[in-house]
Image (spheres, rainbow, N blue to C red):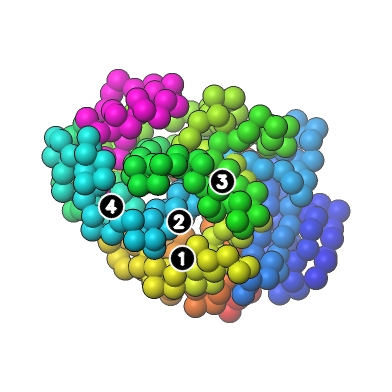
Amino acid sequence: MTRESDVVHGHWDKRFDKVAEALVDEITTGGECGAAIAIDIDGETVVDMWGGHADAAKTRPWTEDTIVNVWSSTKNVTALAGLMLIDRGLIEPTTSVASVWPEFGPNGKRHIEFRHLLSHSSGVSGWEQPVVPEDIFDWDKSTAMLAAQEPWWEPGTASGYQALNHGHLIGEVLRRLTGKTLKQFVAEEIAGPLDADFQIGATPEDHDRIADVILPEDPMEGLPPFDQWPEPMVKTFSGPAPDPAIANTVEWRAADIGAANGHTNARALARILSTISLGGTVGGVQLLRPETVEKIFEVQCDGPDLVLAGQPIRWGLGFGLPKPESIPYIPEGKICFWGGWGGSWETMNPDRRTTFAYAMNKMGPGIQGSERTARYMTLFYDALD
């Protein structure tokens, strides 16, 4: 299994040599600064490799225990938490959010269902102005703001990516049902039982092993000109305006932002998300029943996303489903996935009992995947086939 190189460390099965060679090449040529890839097949970690550096100055190596802010890859774990509520019978996908969170009902939101939150079709994809980052760090204030506003389109009729507030929406429902914060629930009922190195935010004790997020030249490269953005996109990405440098601040790391501030590595993401690929149980720990896993693949929304520049997205219950014309490196099949700003990516493949996870610190341009993501994913599926 072990195929150590001078650049990439860890181990990988021979069939994934080309994935390892691609990671070596990207680190060597500067495409990556530091990164990690993990693959789980049938409950066995057949790939666990990492390399490069944790900082732009290349003074700190990316080690086995390095963690990094993975942006929207966090949403995968938040969605899993939401599915666990359904699995436990605490809520149904069609339950009105207002029946659990009464303050959320006014101003045209009383018919929003829990499945609309999970599938980004709630019409509440961000905060109304004025809003600043300090507001979203304050749970009570930020959720009260969401409860008070109107939806920006008719809920359930289209998706509009809940870029920064996804965890606040699902997390407040979770808090009302369990009495736990999202951060606490993930720590105690997902990461803890699975012995996975994942946390929403990051404790001060872990700051010295966090890789710096390295900013792209243009975080919004590849998107249409601003004057062509639809109104929900403008509102979502200006409330508050995204600044990736915020990920390197103490305040960001202390917050509970289930949409974007998960700190982890590829190994832990593969461990947690193999829950889906393996039918709900990992290493003897059952988080979901098989019938709940099946609900993920029931299409909730399929069409142009009002926040992601009109890109066609097919949403299942909590996760993206294959749409090759939009994301060509995800093939057709029983697959669910999502990734993070700058490139991190995870796919769950129940028919193959296989999970792929990738985390890195040097962000690529754009808001969904990168050329590196496409390269690794293509080689991964080539190897499986």
Tell me which numbered mark, 2 or 3, is placed earlier along the sequence. Answer: 2
Q: Residues within 10 Å of mark 1 (few under 14, many from 20)?
A: many
Question: Residue 383, can we see it?
Answer: yes
Which residue carries the number 3 mark?
A: 187
Is 245 magenta? The answer is: no
Q: Residue at x 74, y 46 (%)?
A: 65
Residue sitting at the far front: 179
Q: Residues within 10 Å of mark 3 (few under 14, many from 20)?
A: some
Tell me the CA gap for discs 1 and 4.
Answer: 17 Å
Check whether the beta carbons of the residues at disc 2 and disc 1 lie within 8 A of each other: yes
User: Percent from the top left, x then y, of residue 353?
Assistant: 55, 74
Tell me which numbered mark, 2 or 1, is placed earlier along the sequence. Answer: 2
Check whether the beta carbons of the residues at disc 4 and disc 3 lie within 8 A of each other: no
Magenta-drawn segment? 121-148
User: Percent from the top left, x then y, of residue 89?
Assistant: 34, 61
User: Percent from the top left, x then y, of residue 365?
Assistant: 51, 41
Q: Secondary structure at mark 3?
A: helix
Tell me the CA gap for discs 2 and 3.
Answer: 13 Å
Tell me the CA gap for discs 1 and 3.
Answer: 17 Å
Nearer-the-camera pick, 247 or 86: 86
Which residue carries the number 4 mark?
A: 114
Is 124 magenta? The answer is: yes
> What label sits on residue 80 in the rendered view?
2
Q: In the figure, 354 relative to 62: above or below?
A: below
Tell me the CA gap for discs 4 and 3.
Answer: 22 Å
